[in-house]
Structure formats: structure tokens, C-alpha cells
């Protein structure tokens, strides 16, 4: 435009100059001096104007370059790409192109089609065609393009047709492209959050900074019902609660930024539900409060789950009674309240036999029926618990009345002993009950239960009875615990020794064998009587380890005497009931024999009558397995329990031992007849007979007349230590007739 103006001005000057020249030539007849003067004047007048025009031209050019620079800076600063598309030729000029400046122009529709994501091409084509058809004022599309590194970017492309041909077909189109990847990511994130809020199972409400409702999610309407519009712009409230309560919650939130509280609200069906409300404040980037979010969580299912979990952790599955966990919890409460109460602990006698013989399923059914029967006998404030296994407890609150407690104990014992008819069986069980009183017998649940167990342990000795706890029981319990600890330490430190009592041929007086007897010799307490520690070891199971120590040492000593040529008989070792019931008994014995290189012929195992009669059929199988290894078997204490001659003839025995009680009773005819009967039975079954506990000469004479082959007792020798027995063997070997060892009784009891 500026250039056109300059040209027009120059044209006007030249035209004026030509016209004036002609005029002068006509008037003055081509006066050369005048013309020269006139030309000079014209040039002098035109030169300043030309200089002014040139100045304006240069200034315009500078302004144009500055304008272009500003435009370029603006485009670069905006990050947008400017494009100019020649639709006819397909050429696209791009300015500030960050992604495709190095890419050649690709012909086609839309332009640069190869750089657009394949899934977005139909959308872009549709919008372009719509704009070409003048159905939209502007072309505007969001799509993905690939940069020179192969990475996809979201862009916003806007443009407009600016030139058309005579037929109104588009010829030229310009526009801009903006990278909106971050905006798109934010949009997707917001959409995700919006969907999360909408699909949130808990009811959610958004309030402004003044606690007026702005929006709610669908779960809010599901929980409380109604339409969205009826809640909007309403103040925060909790139906059923006072305004002061609601205001207090708002105050707490404004002070602490958060509150969580359990309340009761009615749902859309007017059912009162446990609801947990959680309120949090929302702040903007300037740390100003803009909104509050309130979440309403229905706790109904959680409460049900908690109740079920509570039952699982505090109820016994078999009997549905409160369990040991709840027992201690409730007993702690009673103790803290300093409330008088009584604790009765029940233990079923010989319940294990029912489980072992009839199966655990029937045993569990029996416990369930028993629990139902006994629970009916409790008072309103009493609670009946199953502590585990066959142990139960009754807590009688607010009473120390001995008459009431005793009557309840008797009722329970009578109910327990009443037979149960189950699966074709009539099951009769008995129980033992230990009773303690709070606070007299203990001031903590643990002490009360321990003392009740102690009283129950003593009641067991009487059978189907109850006992109140007393100090004597406690002293005995403490002593028992001390013995347990001593045995545990003694096994570790090798304080168990083996003593040997000779078995003598009653006719020749020669040694035929010996019995290995355990002795517990402690460094500080000295010798502890077998009558004291063996019953405790049987109950605790420590007898298994003790028995293995005795068997191992006996085999070791006998092997040494055999090798030295001092002995050629058998050593008898007692086998406890717990050892006999071990599933790997035979393999354990095999290992000990192999370890000591002792042939099985030199070992005899003594088994008590009560042990084999617990389960005779199983006992026969075990005894046959032992006998097949060449081990001799002897039955100890025959006639002191519930003997069965029918089973006796089936047992693969080699020896029958006559108990000391029968030997002591031979001073009268009836006693002699009893021993005679036992010896006769044994001989009829082709069994060898050993009389134990023989202490007097007249007993020897009687036993000779009864044809008893072997005797054992203080008449010949007390139990001897390993070294003492070695000397005894040497004396036996050096004398043609065995000398009698002093029959003076030792202060150590012989326990077979």
C-alpha cells in the first residue's frame, strides 16, 4: 500500500512537470535559460518531498519487521502452530511446528493424514467435510498426532476457509494447532474422579465453604431417597439430631479440618441404620477453604461382620458356648469390679477313651449334647464356658454362698453322669470339679484358674466328685511343679541312673537275670523317690524320655557285662503305658539295641496288666511285633487290676510276675491259695513265674512248695548301682554257691 502511494506521488510530479514545460515552451518560445531555471526550481521543490517519502518508506519497513518479530514471538510464546493450507495443491505451510516441521507434506485429505492417529482420522474427516459444507462456522477438532520421535500428542486444531472459487468451492484455509496433552490428561483424571465419585458405594455430599449443599452422588439418593434438586443449596443437617449437635460438628471440622463419627440415620425406607460420617475440608492453592466433603458410610454389613467375627473369636464351634478367650475377658471384668464370684472348673474323666474308640465326631457330638444339658442348669447371672478339650468352667457371679455353690456342683455332676444315648451306644461319663472363690482363692483370673485346676486334679483322685481349693493343695501343686522342673533339668543333665535288682533261681540260688530300676539323683535335693516322680512323669509325658534313658543305659551295661564274661542272662526293663502307646515303639527299641550292639535275646520288657487291658487287641499286635524280634515279654502286677484270662492266653508272654502284695499276704492260707492259683495259671499257659518283693525266708519256703521258679527282692539283694552290681556279678562268679547279700533294707524304695 505504501509502495503504491509513493508511485502515485512520483507520477503526479512528473505529470505536473511535463504540463508546465509545455506551457512554458508555448509562451516563451522555448527560452532555454528560462527552462533551465524552471527545471532547477522544480527539482528543488520535489527533492524534499522525495526524501520525505523515502523516510516514510524505511520507517514503514522497520515497523513491518518489528510487527513480524512481535507476531513470531507471540506465536512462539503461545506454543501454537499456525498453518496455511492450499486446498487445491495440498501444500501446507506451518509456522512454529514442534512436531512435524521435519516431516514432508503428505498429500491427501485431511492434510498430513499419515501423522494422525488411525482411530482419530474418521472424526477429523467428518468435521472438515462439515465445515466445507458450511455447516459450521469454524473447523475445530481434537485428535492425536505423532511427533518425529514417534510419540503421540493430543492437539486442538482450529481453522476456517478464507478463500473460495467462483463455484464457492474452498481454495484456502488457515488455522492454529495447540498441544493439549496436559489438558487432556487433566481432563481424563477429572473424568476418572467424577466416575469414581458417581460409582462410590458410600453416599457423598459436597458443600460450599458455608456448608450449603453443592452436589451429591447417586449413592446418596440410593441411601436416603428423593431427588437431587430437593437437596441442593440446603444447609448441612442430620435428621433426628438437634441443631446444637450439628453446629458442634461443624465447629470441630473448622478447628481440626476433619471429623469422623458414628451416628444413627434413617434410610429411604425409614429404617434406622448405623452410619459413619466423615467430613473433610477442601482448600485451593491459596490455602483458602472452598468446600467440605461429607461421606456417609452404612455400617450395617460391617456390624454384622464384626458380630460374626466376635462370635468366631469368642464362641466355641463345637458347643456354641463362650470360649476360653471370652472366659478370661469376662473374668477380668468381674475381678476389676471386685465382685464376689465362684469359679467351678469341670474335667470329664476318661473322655479320651470315647474319642479313641468311637471317633472324634461322636465325641464332639457328645460334648455338644453335654453343653446343652448343663447350660440349662445355670442361673440367670451364671455363664458356662468351654475352655478347651473336655474342660469346662462355670462362673457364678455375685455369690460366695457355699450352699448354693455346692448344690450347683452336685447338680452338674449328676447331669454329667446321666448316660447319653448316641449312635446305638449308651455312654456314661463322670467328671471332676475344682472350685475356687474370689477373692479368697486368688485375685487374678490366671491365679483363680490355676487354683481351680489344682482342686480339680485332687478331685480326680476320688472320681466323680468336687473339691474346694485349699492351701494344702497349693503346696502340693507347687511341689509337683518343682518335680516337673527337676525332671526336665535332670534329663538334660543326665541325673537319672539305673539300678539293678537280681533275679535268683529259687532252687539253685544262682543269678538268672535282673530288673533295671530308675533312680533320680539330684545334686541338691538328693535321691527323689520313684513313688514321687514316676506318677508325675506319667502325667506329663516325661516318662517316655526317662524310659528311653533307662532302656539305653541298661542295654549298654548288659553289653559290657556280657563282653566281660560276667553275665549271660536277661535284663528286664519296665515299659510305661505312654511308651507302650507310641506308634513307633518297636523302631525306637530297635535303634537302642543296634546302638548298643545288644542281641534282643538278652532284653525282657515288663508291661503292666492295666496297660495291655486298655486296648487288648492293639496290645496283642504290639506284643507280637516285639516278640517276633526275639524280645521276651513279662506281665507285671498280674491280678492287681481287672485281669481277663480270655486275653491272657492270647498275649505272647514269656513270664508272669506275682505282685509283692500277694507275696506279703502268704502268711495266711487264703493268700497262699491266691499265689498258688496264679502260679498254676502261669504254668498251664507255659509261662515262667517270678515272685517279686520277697524279703523273708519263710516266703522262700512257701514259694518252693508252690513251684515258683524265680524270686526277686531284698531277701537276696537291694537294687544295686552299676558298680555295685558289677561286684555282685564277680562274687557270683567266684563262688560255687551264691552268698546272700545283706537283707538290710535300703532307704531307697524299689519301684518296678
Image (tube, rainbow, N blue to C red):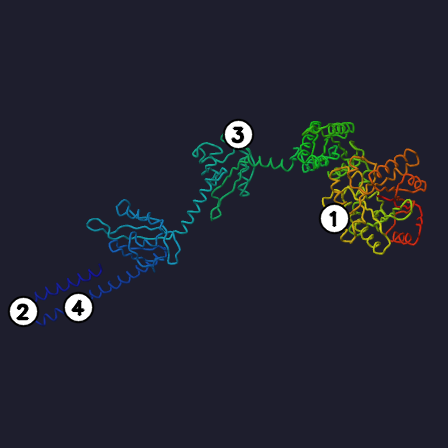
Please tell me the numbered disc located at residue 44.
4
Foreground: 483 or 277?
483
Residue 315 position, x and y percent, is 65, 35
Q: CA distance from mark 1 to mark 4?
A: 140 Å
- Give the quadrant of residue 544: top right
**Circle 4 crowding by C-alpha within 10 Å: few under 14, some 14–19, many from 20:** few
Callout 2–callout 1 Cβ contact below 8 Å: no
Residue linked to disc 1: 588
Q: CA distance from mark 4 to mark 3?
A: 107 Å
Numbered disc total: 4
**Circle 3 crowding by C-alpha within 10 Å: few under 14, some 14–19, many from 20:** few
Quadrant of image for the C terminus: top right
Q: CA distance from mark 1 to mark 3?
A: 69 Å
Residue linked to disc 2: 29
Q: CA distance from mark 2 to mark 4?
A: 24 Å
* Residue at far bottom of view: 33
**Is 296 placed above or below 501 here?**
above
Residue linked to disc 3: 271
**Element type where label 4 sits in the image:** helix
Q: CA distance from mark 2 to mark 1?
A: 160 Å
Q: Earlier in the sequence, mark 4 or mark 3?
A: 4
Asked if residue 514 lies left or right of residue 34, the reply is right
Amino acid at each position: 500500500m505504501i509502495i503504491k502511494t509513493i508511485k502515485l506521488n512520483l507520477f503526479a510530479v512528473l505529470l505536473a512537470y511535463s504540463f508546465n514545460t509545455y506551457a512554458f515552451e508555448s509562451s516563451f518560445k522555448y527560452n532555454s535559460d528560462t527552462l533551465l531555471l524552471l527545471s532547477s526550481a522544480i527539482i528543488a521543490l520535489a527533492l524534499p518531498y522525495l526524501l520525505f517519502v523515502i523516510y516514510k518508506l524505511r520507517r514503514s519497513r522497520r515497523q513491518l519487521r518489528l510487527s513480524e518479530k512481535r507476531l513470531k514471538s507471540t506465536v512462539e510464546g503461545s506454543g501454537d502452530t499456525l498453518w496455511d493450507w492450499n486446498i487445491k495443491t495440498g501444500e501446507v505451510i506451518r509456522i512454529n511446528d514442534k512436531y512435524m516441521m521435519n516431516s514432508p507434506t503428505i498429500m491427501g485429505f485431511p492434510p498430513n493424514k499419515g501423522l494422525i492417529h488411525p482411530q482419530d482420522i474418521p472424526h477429523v474427516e467428518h468435521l472438515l467435510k462439515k465445515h466445507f459444507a458450511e455447516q459450521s462456522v469454524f473447523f475445530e477438532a481434537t485428535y492425536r498426532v505423532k511427533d518425529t520421535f514417534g510419540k503421540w500428542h493430543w492437539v486442538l486444531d482450529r481453522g476456517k476457509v478464507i478463500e473460495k472459487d467462483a463455484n464457492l468451492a474452498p481454495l484456502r484455509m488457515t488455522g492454529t494447532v495447540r498441544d493439549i496433552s496436559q489438558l487432556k490428561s487433566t481432563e481424563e483424571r477429572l473424568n476418572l474422579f467424577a466416575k469414581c465419585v458417581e460409582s462410590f458405594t458410600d453416599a457423598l455430599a459436597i458443600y460450599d465453604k458455608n456448608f450449603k449443599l453443592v452436589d451429591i452422588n447417586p449413592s446418596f439418593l440410593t441411601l436416603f431417597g428423593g431427588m437431587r434438586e430437593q437437596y441442593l443449596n440446603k444447609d448441612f443437617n442430620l435428621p433426628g439430631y438437634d441443631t446444637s449437635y450439628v453446629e458442634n460438628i461443624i465447629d470441630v471440622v473448622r478447628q481440626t479440618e476433619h471429623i469422623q463419627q458414628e451416628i444413627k440415620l434413617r434410610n429411604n425406607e425409614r429404617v434406622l441404620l448405623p452410619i459413619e460420617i466423615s467430613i473433610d475440608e477442601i482448600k485451593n492453592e491459596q490455602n483458602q477453604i472452598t468446600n467440605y466433603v461429607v461421606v456417609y458410610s452404612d455400617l450395617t454389613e460391617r456390624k454384622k461382620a464384626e458380630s460374626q467375627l466376635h462370635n468366631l473369636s469368642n464362641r466355641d464351634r463345637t458347643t456354641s458356648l463362650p470360649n476360653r478367650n471370652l472366659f478370661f475377658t469376662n473374668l477380668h471384668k468381674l475381678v476389676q469390679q471386685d465382685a464376689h464370684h465362684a469359679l467351678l472348673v469341670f474335667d470329664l474323666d476318661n473322655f479320651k477313651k470315647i474319642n479313641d474308640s468311637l471317633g472324634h465326631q461322636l465325641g464332639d457330638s457328645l460334648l455338644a449334647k453335654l453343653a446343652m444339658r448343663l447350660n440349662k442348669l445355670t442361673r440367670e447371672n451364671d455363664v458356662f464356658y468351654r475352655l478347651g478339650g473336655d474342660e469346662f468352667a462355670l462362673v457364678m457371679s455375685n455369690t460366695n454362698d457355699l450352699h448354693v455353690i455346692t448344690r450347683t456342683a452336685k447338680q452338674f455332676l449328676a447331669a454329667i453322669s446321666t448316660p447319653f444315648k448316641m449312635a446305638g451306644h449308651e455312654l456314661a461319663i463322670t467328671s471332676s470339679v475344682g472350685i475356687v472363690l474370689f477373692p479368697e482363692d486368688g485375685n487374678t483370673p490366671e491365679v483363680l484358674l490355676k487354683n481351680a485346676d489344682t482342686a480339680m486334679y485332687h478331685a480326680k483322685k476320688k472320681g466323680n466328685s468336687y473339691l474346694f481349693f485349699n492351701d494344702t493343695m497349693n503346696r502340693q501343686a507347687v511341689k509337683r511343679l518343682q518335680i516337673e522342673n527337676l525332671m526336665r533339668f535332670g534329663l538334660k543333665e543326665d541325673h537319672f541312673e539305673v539300678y539293678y535288682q537280681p533275679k535268683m533261681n529259687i532252687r539253685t540260688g544262682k543269678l538268672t537275670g535282673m530288673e533295671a530300676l530308675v533312680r533320680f539323683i539330684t545334686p541338691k535335693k538328693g535321691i527323689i523317690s520313684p513313688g514321687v516322680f514316676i506318677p508325675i512323669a506319667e502325667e506329663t509325658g516325661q516318662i517316655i524320655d526317662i524310659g528311653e534313658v533307662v532302656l539305653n543305659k541298661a542295654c549298654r551295661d548288659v553289653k559290657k557285662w556280657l563282653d566281660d564274661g560276667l553275665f549271660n542272662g536277661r535284663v528286664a526293663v519296665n515299659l510305661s503305658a505312654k511308651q507302650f502307646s507310641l506308634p513307633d515303639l518297636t523302631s525306637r527299641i530297635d535303634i537302642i539295641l543296634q546302638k548298643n550292639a545288644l542281641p534282643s535275646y538278652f532284653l525282657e520288657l515288663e508291661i503292666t496288666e492295666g496297660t495291655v487291658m486298655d486296648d487288648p487287641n492293639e496290645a496283642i499286635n504290639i506284643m507280637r511285633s516285639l516278640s517276633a524280634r526275639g524280645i521276651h515279654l513279662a506281665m507285671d502286677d498280674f491280678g492287681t487290676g481287672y485281669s481277663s484270662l480270655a486275653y491272657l492266653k492270647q498275649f505272647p508272654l514269656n513270664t508272669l510276675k506275682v505282685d509283692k502284695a500277694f507275696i506279703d499276704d502268704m502268711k495266711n492260707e487264703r493268700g497262699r491259695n491266691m499265689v498258688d492259683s496264679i502260679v498254676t495259671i502261669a504254668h498251664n499257659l507255659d509261662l515262667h513265674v517270678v515272685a517279686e518283693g520277697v524279703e523273708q525266708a519263710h516266703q522262700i519256703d512257701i514259694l518252693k512248695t508252690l513251684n515258683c521258679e524265680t524270686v526277686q527282692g531284698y531277701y537276696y539283694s537291694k537294687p544295686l548301682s552299676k558298680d555295685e552290681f558289677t561286684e555282685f556279678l564277680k562274687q557270683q562268679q567266684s563262688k560255687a554257691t551264691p552268698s546272700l547279700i545283706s537283707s538290710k533294707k535300703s532307704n531307697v524304695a524299689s519301684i518296678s
